[in-house]
Image (spheres, grey):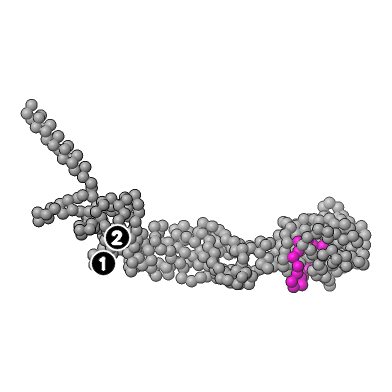
Amino acid sequence: MKTKNIIRIAALGLMGYLMYGCSKQDTEFESFLNGKEVKYPGTISKITPRPGNLRAGITFHPSSDPSVTRYVVYWNNKADSIVYTSDNHNPSDSLTVIVPNLNEYIYSFTMFSYDAKGNRSVPRDINNVKVYGPVYQSGLSNRNYNLANPYGISADGKVKLNFNLMDTAAHNVFTDIKYTNKAGQETIARINADSLSIVLPDYKADTKIQFRSAFIPVKTAIDTFYVSDYEDFATINAVAVCDKKLFKKVSLPYDAGALEGGTDLDKLWDGSNGPQGYPNIWHSDGHGPLPVVFTFDMGAVYKGLVAIEETGRNCCHNPDDFEVWGIADITNAATSLKANDAGWAAEATAKGWKLLKSIKRNDDGSAPLKVNFDPNPPPVRYIRIRIKHNSNGEGNYTNMSELTFWNNALL
């Protein structure tokens, strides 16, 4: 029985000692040196090293010990140090100390907490912290733009630049786009790494576009590294093909109809290449001698039409003398005269139509012919083609295979 009692007493004593030890804050670590009590302030926790550009950051959660007034980071075998002062003792907060003026190298740091009396905590070591610099930067290269489809231009003059995605291992974060806006000012736009395109709403035509990519070596880095030099983007050709998907037929009084349903105006913007054979053409109904006229809607107002290409049929009745007229709004623009009336052109002008180009051909009218419009055209959405003569002398029927328009979309 005595033995059992001794065991019980020892067990109770050990439990009491453990309970006493657990009740003391883990920040109140004590020892004795030369008979004197030494206090060790509380240490930091949740340390995250953060590489930078010839510097490093150390993010940590502060000690809950209220006696701590500062933290000191040592490196180079404690030959160098930096002091970080803080009165934050909330261990759920994050603090960051920046260690400057480092070389591009792998460092080890030691960090201590200090109280106002100069007592310091047990050390916390932070090893294998890689610092980046010129060597790392020299190996960076810009994100590639899409060579097959570098840009697009909308009808309202907005330029969209297209890029390829980078290897995710490269840690590209964004790319800066440097360009000149319509006010003549240098402007910087930014495309994020996960985006494939960016729109420049105010790009000034015939000016250079350059780009430069930015990277971080690791996700926790405190600094962003740029490629040393800007790179030229593909040359923007301001002249773009008008979108034929927007084209549609308009019927104004005395417009020529189609010979049959399969030869209507939509054949003129179906994307066919080269002279087409019947019925893959627009063919007039023959109701009246030339000149005849037809009208269509381009689907958008173009401020700077540049050129037209007309392709005839692969055999006959092709125009060799015709006019291209344009207007932005057809409200009250219908003419009351037939296209073969001598007064038609004057009435069209009075209604607001603008003669964009008179075109005469010296061949049989079948091959594609591209003709530039006169400079400074008005805004145009609606087109009227007035056919005055055929190359083979046919005076009632006429036909075409395709019409294509170009626009300086950046005006």
Q: Residue at x 60, y 63 (%)?
A: 200
State which quadrant residue 244 falls in: bottom right
- Give the residue type that dot 2 points to: Thr
What residue would you read off at disc 2? 85
Q: Residue at x 39, y 60 (%)?
A: 221
- Distance from Cα at disc 1 to Cα at disc 2: 17 Å
What residue would you read off at disc 1? 80
- Give the residue type that dot 1 points to: Asp
Numbered disc 1: secondary structure: strand
Q: Residue at x 26, y 67 (%)?
A: 80
Circle 2 packing at 10 Å, graded few (<14), some (14-19), many (20+), is some
Q: Is residue 206 magenta?
A: no
| Label number found at residue 281 | none
Q: Position of residue 176 (x, y in %)?
A: 51, 65
For the view shown, which residue lies furthest in the top direction? 1
Q: Position of residue 327 (x, y in %)?
A: 79, 63
The N terminus lies in quadrant:
top left
Magenta-drawn segment: 365-385
